Image (spheres, grey):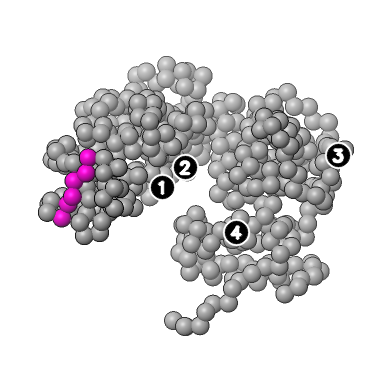
Amino acid sequence: MSMMAEPEITLPGHVRQELAYTADPGFAARLRAELRARQARNTRNLSWFEIELPVGPIRLVHDGELVHLVTRDLKRFDALAHEGLGFEPPFGDSRRVREALSAVLAGRRRGSDVAFLGGLSPFQQAVLKVTATIPKGQLRPYHWVARHAGSPGAVRAAGTALGHNPVPFVVPCHRVVRSDWTLGEYSAGGTEVKEQVLRAEGVTPERLDWLQHAPRYIGQLATHEFCLAACPGLDEEDPALHRPFRSLEEALAEGYVPCETCRPL
Amino acid sequence: MDESALVAAAKTSPDAFAALYDRTQPEVYRYAYSLAGNHAGAEDLTAEAYRRALNHLPAYEDRGRPFAAWLCTIVRNLARDRGRKAGREVPLMDHDQPVDGWPGAAVELAERRTLVQAAVARLPDVQRQVVVLRFGHERSCREVAEQLGKSEAAVKQLTYRAVNRLREILVEAGYEHDG
């Protein structure tokens, strides 16, 4: 590799000024999908198909691009559809949505990018977007979700928002558990289903048991970083390398910095 | 498809509305940016204006005016309401775009699309995204790489190619450049 400094690539000022009037392509694409989804709902251009998961079949309502509703409760689908959408859509497959779903379920894409969340309150949207960042096979507590959604005090409200998640599995609300790492409730079928879904993602009962006996935050002596007990970067086999903390404040006061993998703060 | 037909189709078709959005968004965003003076404000105004337009679309009567002019009117009203709420005037950054005599100005704005915008529109998709983010939004290579899911080296390479291509298109179009 050449040691010479690369020449700075630049454009004349007036050209840059013109470019400044152009929307961020990411924003433009998201808004496009949102508007298309809104119009699909207004004009009843939605349909559903089913896919098979380890916990059984789920039914997804989509507009050909985004997912609007997900349920395991196939018997009550008509009631749920009327409640959530105002009408009952017909069957209709979509290769594009299926491909997007495989990417989400494999952990390659964020569920919030393929779901229509536009009908929800700003807080509920924030909670679901944060939840969609939790990687497959990992857990986060409700208080973590509330903090990252911008309202550290709204732990219960975050729980309620997740309880009303219109797109479970797509936005993985099953990865959010109580502060003591007990599973807590699950709108798509209760605690047992939550346990099954997590087990299919590699979260074993032994892992949950370990977490339930672990300190709330764990400092790593070597790096002076502190983590949530559920951080995949922690070596749970070697507690001699750990320093337990009861609170964020305690960890920060000791000069520990938040881990960038589990982002405790 | 001519715009009137597209507007009529958009009343019942999500894809037609998306196509209408593609056609009008650059102008609407440009106008929103000129009122807000920053990207966060412009995004907010643009998104809200389209949501309102969608809600009022069933009652929309096509009187031969460009659809973008209607959207710009909505943007302008939203910006005014927000300025009022904040207890101050909204800064008007775009001094060369008169807002007096609206909505005629929106039509004019549509017609006065600059050479630069036309040139940027001719770039391949990825190059356009990189140029807009790097120079329009003043993001670093690292930030652009993260947003587009590419490596920093790839973004540097793309920037280099895009800028060269842009220069070529502009020179071809008779645009004088000082570099």
Residue at the top extreme? Answer: A79
Q: Are marks 3 and 2 in contact (CB under 8 Å)?
A: no
Q: Nearer the viewer, residue A167 or A79?
A: A167
Name the residue beneath numbered marker 2. Answer: A113
> The magenta stretch spans which residues?
A241-246
Q: Earlier in the sequence, mark 3 or mark 4?
A: 3
Q: Nearer the viewer, residue B101 or A228?
A: A228
Q: Are marks 1 and 3 in contact (CB under 8 Å)?
A: no
**Label 3, label 4: how far apart the Cα atoms are:** 31 Å
**Label 1, label 2: how far apart the Cα atoms are:** 8 Å
Do circles 1 and 3 both sit on a common chain?
no
- Image disc number at residue A109: 1
Image quarter in which the C terminus of chain A is found: top left
Q: Nearer the viewer, mark 4 or mark 1?
A: 4
Q: Disc 3: which chain?
A: B
Name the residue beneath numbered marker 4. Answer: B138
- Per the image, label 3 sits on a secondary structure element best described as loop
Q: Is residue A46 magenta?
A: no
- Image disc number at residue B100: 3
The picture quadrant where one finds residue A141 is: top left
Q: Disc 2: which chain?
A: A
Q: Are marks 1 and 2 in contact (CB under 8 Å)?
A: yes
Residue type at tag 3? Asp
Mark 3 is surrounded, within 10 Å at the Cα level, by few (under 14), some (14 to 19) or many (20 or more) other residues, namely few
> Is B110 placed above or below A83 here?
below
**Label 2, label 4: how far apart the Cα atoms are:** 24 Å
**Label 4, label 1: how far apart the Cα atoms are:** 26 Å
Residue type at tag 4? Glu
Image quarter in which the N terminus of chain A is found: bottom left
Q: Nearer the viewer, mark 3 or mark 2?
A: 3
